[in-house]
Image (cartoon, rainbow, N blue to C red):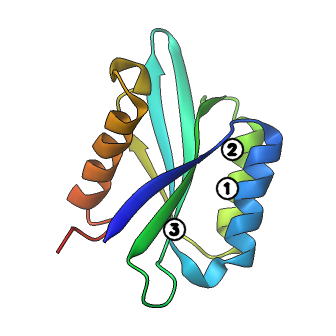
Amino acid sequence: MIQQFIELGEGYGDVYELCELMKTNKHRISRTIIFTATEGEKKVASIAAVFNPVGESKFTPIYICREGIPYSAEKPSKRLEIFKETVNSLDQLLITLDVKHSSIYAEKDLYYQYLIGILRLYHYIPSLH
């Protein structure tokens, strides 16, 4: 089984693209997630959607808009609101996880391995068999 992050950008267009992927593939959505992280004084969010494999495929795509969204409980970002509205309209459970910021990893692939480890630990994605 291959579980891989597919990174979209962090702008409005990318959030709309992720939401459209979710709407057109709603039957494949496994999980929807907000990852929050702190770098210095700034708290940021990544939004992600985990899709089930297609047919006999062993590929689990995890689409993500990484760390480009400011995160604040007092004043929610419009991009987060758009994502949350889409998740609610699709009757999905939204999971929020506080994780380490990607800047502490030497390579982006190591960061994604860290996130995959967390998702497996909490059984949000299947472990490798």
Quarter of the image that includes the N terminus: bottom left
In this figure, which residue is indicated by the disc labeled 1? 84
Q: Is residue 78 left or right of residue 5?
A: right
- Mark 1 or mark 3, earlier in chain: 1
The residue beneath circle 3 is 93
Q: Earlier in the sequence, mark 2 or mark 3?
A: 2
Residue 77 image position (x, y, % from top left): 72, 35
Q: Are marks 2 and 1 in contact (CB under 8 Å)?
A: yes
- Where's residue 39, x and y in %? 46, 16
**Rendered position, 101 above or below 39:** below
Q: What whole-number distance in Å separates the C-alpha atoms at marks 2 and 3?
A: 15 Å
Total numbered labels:
3
- Whole-Å distance between the Cαs marked 1 and 3? 10 Å
- Callout 1 amino acid: Lys
Q: Residue at x 57, y 72 (%)?
A: 92
Q: Secondary structure at mark 3?
A: loop
Residue at position x 52%, y 23% in the image:
43
- What percent of the width, then of the height, locates residue 29? 55, 74
Q: Which mark is residue 127?
A: none
SS label for mark 2:
helix
Q: What percent of the width, then of the height, locates residue 53?
A: 47, 78
Question: What amino acid is at disc 3?
Answer: Leu
- Quarter in which the C terminus is drawn: bottom left
Q: Nearer the viewer, residue 106 or 98?
A: 106
Q: Residue under circle 2?
A: 80
